[in-house]
Amino acid sequence: MTLLDSWLVVLGLAIGTFLIRYSFIGLFANRDMPEWLSHGLKLIVPAIFAAIVATGLFISAGQFGGWALWPRYVAAVIAFGIALKTKGNILATVGGGMLALHALTWLRG
């Protein structure tokens, strides 16, 4: 890839990002969004978070980890249980999950 190709990619991405943002800021600024679109937009953040967590949970070094990553799986279940018990307290959930992961990794050796 040449230097010109790299700058064309950057320019294309900049234009695409601008158009995506403008579509909501410029087109929907003084209008009500359709209910189906508003509902769909509320689900984007949890979906992105779930994708990030699932990738970190199941993928290691670019490959599916399988049973070698069992401490991650157990820590995720423990964190999920803490989240249910504390009604979504993020500090307790993350702290408990991290503590469980480090303890299980240490126990595994």
Image: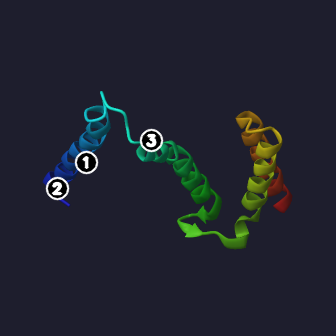
Please state the total of marks drawn on the protein image.
3
**For the C terminus, which image quadrant?**
bottom right
x and y percentages locating residue 81 in the rendered image: 81, 49
- Residue 82 lies in quadrant: top right
Q: Which residue is the extreme one toward the top?
A: 30
Q: Residue at x 82, y 56 (%)?
A: 104
x and y percentages locating residue 107 in the rendered image: 86, 57
Measured Cα–Cα span from mark 2 to mark 3: 37 Å
Q: Of circles 2 and 3, which is in front?
A: 3
Q: Which residue is mark 1?
A: 13
**Mark 2, secondary structure of its residue:** helix
x and y percentages locating residue 46 in the rendered image: 56, 47
- Residue 72 lies in quadrant: bottom right
Q: Which residue is mark 3?
A: 38
**Mark 1, secondary structure of its residue:** helix
- Residue 1 lies in quadrant: bottom left
Q: Closer to the N terminus: mark 1 or mark 2? A: 2
* Front position in the image: 94 or 40: 40
Name the kind of residue labelled 3 in the image.
Ser
Q: Which residue is mark 2?
A: 5
Q: Residue at x 76, y 43 (%)?
A: 83
Measured Cα–Cα span from mark 1 to mark 3: 25 Å
Name the kind of residue labelled 1 in the image.
Leu
Name the kind of residue labelled 2 in the image.
Asp
Q: Which residue is the extreme one toward the right?
A: 107
